[in-house]
Image (cartoon, grey):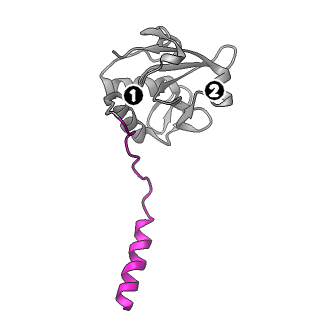
Amino acid sequence: MKIIWLFLATLLLFSGCSTKQKRPFPSGKKNKVLQKLYLEYEYWEGSSYKYGGTKEGAIDCSAFVQSIYKTAFGKIIPRTTWLQAKEGRYIAKKNLKAGDLVFFKTSKRDRHVGIYLKNGKFMHASSSRGVTISSINSSYWRKKYWMARRILR
């Protein structure tokens, strides 16, 4: 009986030691673009933001987007947010699809970019939270929304 309790205690102890749990892919139709984006997000999640940064652990928003596009889709896009905002074609907010670039005016001269996922969510390198997923409908991002561009398809 003691062996069973010891086994159960050990099992409980080690089952809680995982540092990062895998998130399941979004349910519904298999969207290959969305799957690739979530795989990339799992790799980058938690990386810190650094203005001008281009590497894991220290990256800015436009380098993050550039890296995702190169790795997940084999597409080379410009390095800066300003140049990325000229790529592809304009998309109305109501027509956003997974993979579209979403742009925000965060100050009079600064711009921010992320990649749309679905249901109002986008992934980006946030200056305050690092690589994360946010809602374009949050009180902060809703006020800062500028435009979206479609490069894929």
Across and down, in percent, residue 143 comes to 68, 22
Q: Residues within 10 Å of mark 2 (few under 14, many from 20)?
A: some
Q: Is residue 8 magenta?
A: yes
Across and down, in percent, residue 22 comes to 39, 49
Left or right relative to 83: residue 8 = left
Marks 1/2 in contact by CB < 8 Å: the verdict is no
Q: Earlier in the sequence, mark 1 or mark 2?
A: 1
Across and down, in percent, residue 94 comes to 52, 17
Q: Is residue 138 magenta?
A: no
Across and down, in percent, residue 152 comes to 36, 17
The answer to whether 141 is drawn above or below residue 42 in the figure is: above
Q: Residue at x 31, y 30 (%)?
A: 32
The answer to whether any part of residue 29 appears in the image is: yes
Secondary structure beneath disc 2? helix
For badge 2, the amino acid type reads Trp
Q: Residue at x 59, y 38 (%)?
A: 129
- In the picture of the structure, the residue carrying the numbered disc 1 is 68
Q: Residues within 10 Å of mark 1 (few under 14, many from 20)?
A: many
- In the picture of the structure, the residue carrying the numbered disc 2 is 141
The answer to whether 76 is drawn above or below residue 127 in the figure is: above
Secondary structure beneath disc 1? helix
Q: Quadrant of the C terminus?
A: top left
The image quadrant that residue 128 belongs to is top right
Q: Quadrant of the N terminus?
A: bottom left
> Which numbered disc, 1 or 2, marks the residue closer to the eye?
2
Q: Which residues fall within the magenta stretch?
A: 1-28
Q: Residue at x 64, y 31 (%)?
A: 138
The answer to whether any part of residue 106 appears in the image is: no
For badge 1, the amino acid type reads Ile
**How many circles with numbers are drawn on the protein?**
2
Left or right relative to 151: residue 110 = right
Q: CA distance from mark 1 to mark 2?
A: 21 Å
